[in-house]
Image (cartoon, rainbow, N blue to C red):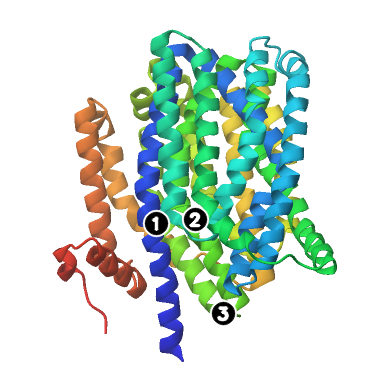
Amino acid sequence: MKNNHNTEVNKSLWFIVKGSIIVLIGLFISKILTYIYKIIIAKNFGPESYGLFSLALIITTLFSTVASLGLSEGLLRYISLYSDIKNFKKIKFLLNFSVISSCISGLFFAILLFIFSNKIAIGFFHNRDLIIYLRYFSLSVPLILFSNLFLSVIKSSQQIVRYTFLVNIFQNSLKLIVLLILIIIGLSSHAIIGSYLISLFGLTIAAYFGSKYYIQKVMVERNLSTKDKFSLTKEFILYSWPVIFVSFAGTFLYWIDSLVIGYLIDTVSVGIYSAAFTVVSILGIAPELFMQLFLPIIVRDYVRGRGEIISQISKQVSKWIWVLNIPVFTFLIIFPKVIINLLFGSQYLEATESLRILAIGGFFSSFIPLTTSLLSMKGKSKSILLTILIAAFLNIVLGWILVSNYGIKGAAIATSFVWFLTLSIYLIQVYLSTKIFPLRRKLIYILGISFIPAFGLFYFQEYLSSSKIIFLIGAVIYLLIYLMILFISKCFDKNDILMMRNLFSALKYKSIKILPKFN
């Protein structure tokens, strides 16, 4: 029985790891393209234009989140659920319901954003230049809704290669190429608007064709009875409507510091702060590697009553996130000035301390997607909503007080504290609802031994900061020492070693022989 249990855990972990390889490649390319895109905007148009772009993106995202009605998140859960039991009739109905609802909602909120763009730009942010961004960006609302629906279909059917390519590579490549072309043509700041809209339109079309085969396969099914339609609609809406507020509050929580800065200070400060926020988002790569397939897998195991397997998978994934993010966290704490100057230039160095503070909160926040996935598995969307609402309210209050007194550094303090508090609340909720605590005590031990190579970086930080080449060489040496210490101190368990052996085998490396074997 125990062997069967271990086999199921290893199968699920390997499935996540295989998916993470694909996601890693996509994310690596995506981050490079995204940083190049934002760096071009920041350096060519300055902090003010970068701030206007950031604010317009935040506001449009908030409108789109409300307009989505939580349908794309609902589809992700219910397609995963009904695909496992092959109930394609229900999937067909939910797809039709979601498309029609999104069409109506998307047009309504796009018009709403266009009409109120003047009041938002001048009345709230005191900047007339923001109006043109908001009016053009209003066109993106229905595009965001439909692209998310089609991407949910692709993701829930576990077509991770296709999903990763579209979201991380195709969209960002198109955005960057269009931006460069429009800059060469001489469209100035309109190049930012054009590149954003064209890339989003391209993603929507590509996502439709990427999900077309699955949709056509489902659409041949017969329709549900009227009674079943009513029952399923009720169940779907009861799950999805809290997700509207969860997504909105989550997006609002994510960007609230920038909104407060824009209101209390100016768009230039928003642009400078956004540079730090962009850099700290690197800490989100590790959870994103594993979260693409984590929810569909634990939902499947939950339906089959495999609670212990879910617990083991959760603890293993949290350990991988921890191990991957410690080096990133270390560099953000020790070398914030070097990193900002390297990526954005000297005019953004004011964000140095903000980056260091955000790195602390960002490290803890990287575990939030894992906890919310476990709560979503249990259908606890209302619990997620309540937590985010509390966090958002607290962030507004703290942000208002601290930004007024300490500027963008105050925003970073408020956000980091709220991220830590949010994770703590989610961990308690997960344990109370599932009896799973996804963090192991061994993580403290791993953190402790990671101070050994980190001390070397701190001691030689002035020398390592002297040139880009020396900095990169130092980073490579640090990573090698860090990995060596993890092996020597036996921080990797049987599951870790097995996943590594499978990974190296899949990549056709003969070096797997150097890894220790377990009987």
Q: Which residue is mark 3?
A: 306
Label of residue 311 in the image: none
**Residue 235, percent across and down?**
78, 63
Q: Earlier in the sequence, mark 3 or mark 2?
A: 2
Q: Earlier in the sequence, mark 2 or mark 1?
A: 1
Residue found 50% across the figure and 30% down from its top: 199
Up the image or down, 18 lies above or below 148; here it is: below
| 217, 201: nearer the viewer | 217
Q: Amino acid at mark 2?
A: Gln
Up the image or down, 388 lies above or below 442; here it is: above
Quarter of the view holding residue 227: bottom right
**Residue 366 visible in the shown view:** yes
Quarter of the view holding residue 410: top right
Q: Amino acid at mark 3?
A: Arg
Q: Amino acid at mark 1?
A: Ser
Tags 3 and 1 touching, CB below 8 Å: no
Label of residue 292 in the image: 2
Residue found 60% across the figure and 53% down from its top: 423
**Residue 306, percent across and down?**
56, 79
Residue found 15% across the figure and 70% down from its top: 513
Q: Residues within 10 Å of mark 3 (few under 14, many from 20)?
A: some
Give the distance between the C-alpha atoms of the residues marked 3 and 1, in whole angstroms. Answer: 23 Å
